[in-house]
Amino acid sequence: MAISKLERLPLREVWKHEAHDFTQWLEDNEDVLSEAIDRSVEMVQREKKTSGSLSVDLVAKDDSGQAIIIENQLEKSDHDHLGKLITYLTAMEASTAIWIVADPRPEHMAAVNWLNESSSADFFLLKIEAVRIQNSLPAPLLTLIAGPSEEAKSIGREKQEIKVRNQTLLKWWTQLVSLPDVKHHSHITPSKNHWISVGSGVRGVRYDLAVKKLEASAEVYIDRGKGMDEENLRFFDRLLEKRESIEMQFGGKLSWERLDGKRACRIRAGLEGGYNSPEDTWSKIQGRMVEAMNKLVQAIDPHLKKIRL
């Protein structure tokens, strides 16, 4: 059976003028666009003026009546049109932006994907081609290059949560290390981690201040290196032998976490409250962390250097 070849035509042979021909054609064939993005598109107005001197190629609406702005470009995508797309979206308070181009550049594909991750609006990047088979009439071929997805929105939300958390942790540690009673961590540069650490003077043993959303702790963390799991356990057990004396000096019970099957062990004083607690309570929580760390060091230090494995 003979099969014909698909022939691609220069776009300007089919639509000589972008605004007068292609935009007009698209306005009259909204079903083609709807099919390409798998979403209802109902054309509303062509060359819609924004509050400034710019004009949106097409304004449409979806099933819920939300505005869709459409920008056409019968050439290679460029930064100018990307900027206009975002400007039109905000000016029209639209929920969706569609950018139709002849040749999408990789950096603009990445930009549209980033916009879908980072904003509440939906952005579509479509490639327009004109094709025919043998001597048939030209036909449009719209290909979705980049568009919104629940996965992208989820990634965007996760990235935003990480950004906010990092900013909060940096603020938390900046405030804590500046407290007047900090004896052991005052020289530590605030970080975005959940913990800050100082060495104990004994290899593989450090003192950690740690914080989570709603809990915090002062800890002795034992990790003498990769492949030293058994040595970590032996070191922990030697301290555990002095538990009664250590807790008496500390002034309360500690959580002794041998963590069998894991590389490290720890001894911790757990506290209520964390970085998601109301900010006006931070100083009290941090004060308790510092107090617990000062007492923990005082209770543990005399025993560390006496341990021989």
Image (cartoon, grey):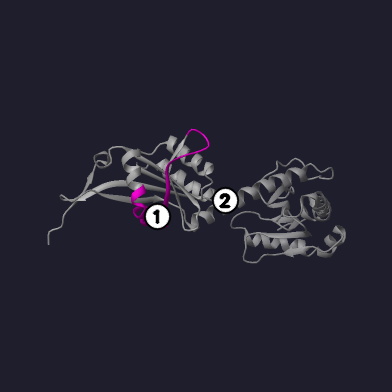
Q: Residue furthest front?
A: 45
Q: Residue 124 bears which disc, if any?
A: none
Of the two numbered discs 1 and 2 on the same chain, state the one appearing first in sequence. Answer: 1
Q: What residue did someone put label 1 on? A: 37
Q: Residue furthest bottom?
A: 260
Residue depicted at x 71% and y 44% = 171
Residue 190 x, y percent position in the rendering? 70, 43
Classify residue 303 as left or right of residue 229. Answer: right
Q: Compute the Cα span from label 1 to label 2.
A: 26 Å
Q: What residue did someone put label 2 on? A: 159
Q: Residues within 10 Å of mark 1 (few under 14, many from 20)?
A: some
Residue 104 x, y percent position in the rendering? 37, 42
Image quarter where the N terminus lies is bottom left
Q: Residues within 10 Å of mark 2 (few under 14, many from 20)?
A: some
Classify residue 293 as left or right of residue 101. Answer: right
Residue nearest the observer in this picture, 294 or 134: 134
**Residue type highlighted by circle 2:** Lys
Residue depicted at x 65% and y 48% = 166
Residue nearest the observer in this picture, 127 or 94: 94
Q: Over which residues does the magenta segment extend?
A: 27-53
Question: Which quadrant of the structure image shows residue 71?
Answer: top left
| Residue 227 belongs to magenta span | no
**Residue type highlighted by circle 1:** Ile
Residue 26 x, y percent position in the rendering? 35, 47
Q: Tag 2's secondary structure? A: helix
